[in-house]
Image (cartoon, rainbow, N blue to C red):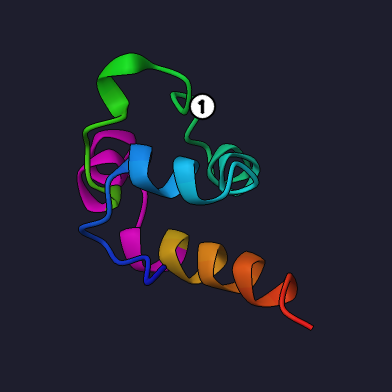
Amino acid sequence: MDITLQTTMGEMLEYDMGIAYVLMQCGMHCVGCPSSIGESLEDACAVHGLNPEDVLKQIHAYLASKVD
C-alpha cells in the first residue's frame, strides 16, 4: 500500500496496526477514536499541530524496516 498524506487513518491501521505505535509516538493519541478513522493523515496532523511530512516519513521508515 502506498501511504500518502491523503490516506485515511482507518486505511493505514487496516493495512498495518503497527502504524498506531508510530502515530502515538508522534503525539497522536486519538488512534482509536472513531471520528479519526475517516480523517486523512494530513487532517489528523493538523488537528494535533504536527508536521504531516515528518509523520509520513516516520510511517514510511517503520514500514521499510519491516521489509527484508
Element class at badge 1: loop
User: Who is closer to the viewer here, 53 or 39?
Assistant: 39
Which SS does the magenta portion mostly show? helix
Residue at image mark 1? 29
Instruction: Judge whether 68 appears above or below 8 on screen.
Output: below
Tell me the kind of residue under disc 1: His
Q: Is 45 included in the stretch rendered in magenta? A: yes
Quadrant location, the N terminus:
bottom left
Task: Give the residue at the far right of this rendering.
Answer: 68
Callout 1: 10 Å neighbours few (<14), some, many (20+)? few
- Towards the viewer: 66 or 39: 66
Q: Picture coordinates of residue 32 (x, y %)? A: 47, 20
**Residue at left offset 57%, top offset 49%:** 16
Give the x, y percent position of residue 65: 73, 74
Left or right: 14, with 67 as reference point = left
> Residue at the location (58% across, 37% down)?
24
On screen, residue 63 versus residue 56, left or right, reads right
Q: Residue at x 72, y 78 (%)?
A: 67
Residue situated in front as seen by the camera: 47 or 34: 34
Check if residue 59 falls in the magenta segment: no
Residue situated in front as seen by the camera: 61 or 3: 3
Find residue 7 and report its image quarter.
Answer: bottom left
Above or below: residue 26 compared with residue 60? above
In this rendering, the answer to whether 53 lies above or below 30 is: below
Q: Position of residue 48 (x, y in %)?
A: 34, 35
- What stretch of residues is rendered in magenta? 42-54
Which quadrant would the C terminus be assigned to in this image? bottom right
Residue 12 on image: x %, y % = 42, 49
Name which quarter of the figure residue 35 lies in: top left
Residue found at the far top of this picture: 34
